[in-house]
Image: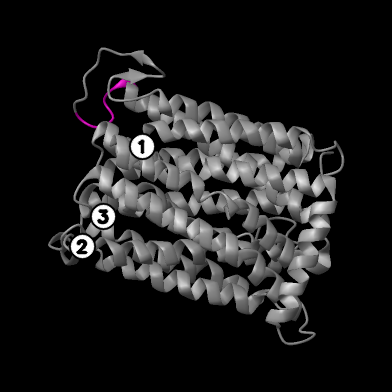
Amino acid sequence: MAKGLNRQEAAWSLTEAANEPFFNLVQRYVFAPYFAGTLAASQAEGAAMWGFALGAAGLAIAILAPVLGSIADSGARLKPWLAGSALVAFLASASLWFAFPGVPLLPIAFAVFAGSVAAELMNQFGNAFLPVSARPQKMGLLSGLSFGISQLVGMAVLLVVLGVSQAAPAVLAEVPNSIDRLAGPLAAACILLFLTPFLLVANDRPQVRAASVKQGLLDLRATLLEAWRDRTMRLFLIARMVSADGMAIVFGFGAVLAAASFGWKADTLARFGLVITSFGVLGGFAAGWIDGRIGCKRLSMLGLGLMAFGAASVMLTDAERVFGVPTGVALSKPLATPQEWGFMASGGIIAAGAAFTIAGMRTMMATLAPQARIAAYFGLYSFVGKATAFIGPTLVGIIAASTGSVRPGIGVAVAFLLASMLVLAAVRPGAAGDA
């Protein structure tokens, strides 16, 4: 148990680690390039369908998150919603083992869609537990600690993939594409391992009445009106919405772009993920320390600026150039050229910036939201994070289908991240946990 944390706070700090492996293994570094480069008939077709699957998931979250958050608040208890979303994420992740070449893409895309939606709902209800489970003076520390632990777990599962790819056990060695397909079952196992302690030890809010759809929708309407009238909350939610657009692109297509640019396979992509995730770990643990010194608003703005810079660098790095400058070094074996390591460095900057932004914005929401409607407000937080975030992946899907490349879509991400930074700067100092 971390020093100074009680049992419930320590258990909460593990909850983000339950769904991070899904994002690392499925959405980013292992299954996404496998889907686009192996399962699909062509890279362009795979990237397009991947973009549409993530876009559909974002749209579903935009609709479901605030409604379910308000319904949960109408009945007060949060655990059933957290456990239910975890069950769906577990089943969808485990089913990806059956995604072998020759299986129709649509059922696989649907499993990714369902898992993505459920993982986001897990995150929503886990976040809603932060002010319930933590003492006020510990929330900023816990937010950064939780992100850092989740990144360590993300690294651990990538090490598993790398280890298995180097020396596959006999039971996997003869199974086609077993390393790529293992991503789903590993993500499912982490849901059980890291969420179960919290579900066992956490104290839920007292049940005051049965959850009501009607009451939940009425509460949602009231929450929307209340949030819109509050200038600070309104600006914060707009900044959150725009930043999520940019992050959806860079996280959803970074490994796909790396595989297309450099021809990286599962083992190299796992190494890429390890390097990137290590920056996320450092950023997550540093975020808690930095938050106490500059405040969560400035922490979030710093993160957005780093992500925009890193995304611009990624866009300008390909098989022949690093940051737009030709290297004169041809691709040979993996990770042997300046352009590949430049791509790695850019991804690390993005990961550190994402850690700052995610930890900072989560603490801002926990600070700003009325505690009696915390799940509804975190539902609104998820809603604005997905209300337009489906546009980014969908645009990249359209771009990939029409040009055969996802690279131009990264420029859209840069624009979104810079716009979010400008909006967040307009939030009044001191009004959103700035000090």
Task: Where is residue 9? Give x, y as percent.
Answer: 70, 63
Name the residue carrying label 2.
100
Whether residue 6 is visible here, answered yes or no, is no
Task: Where is residue 29? Give x, y as percent.
Answer: 37, 47
Query: Which numbered disc, 2 or 1, marks the residue that appears first in the sequence?
Result: 2
Q: Amino acid at mark 2?
A: Phe
- Element type at marker 2? loop
Outermost residue, right direction? 430
Task: Inspect the magenta stretch and tell me whether residue 334 lies in it.
Answer: yes
Dot label at residue 406: 1
Task: Inspect the magenta stretch and tell me whether residue 328 lies in it.
Answer: no
Task: Where is residue 8? Give x, y as percent.
Answer: 70, 68
Highlighted range, magenta: 333-338
Query: Which numbered disc, 1 or 3, marks the residue that appears first in the sequence?
Result: 3
How many neighbours does mark 3 have within 10 angstroms: few (below 14), some (14-19), or many (20 or more)? some
Which image quadrant: the C terminus? top right
In this rendering, the label closer to the viewer, 1 or 3: 1
Q: Is residue 174 left or right of residue 36?
A: left
Task: Where is residue 112? Give x, y as percent.
Answer: 39, 62
Residue at x 22%, y 64% (from the top left corner)? 104
Q: In the picture shown, does residue 414 fall above or below 73? A: above
Name the residue carrying label 3.
164
- Element type at marker 1? loop
Q: In the picture shown, does residue 359 fall above or below 22? A: above
- Element type at marker 3? helix
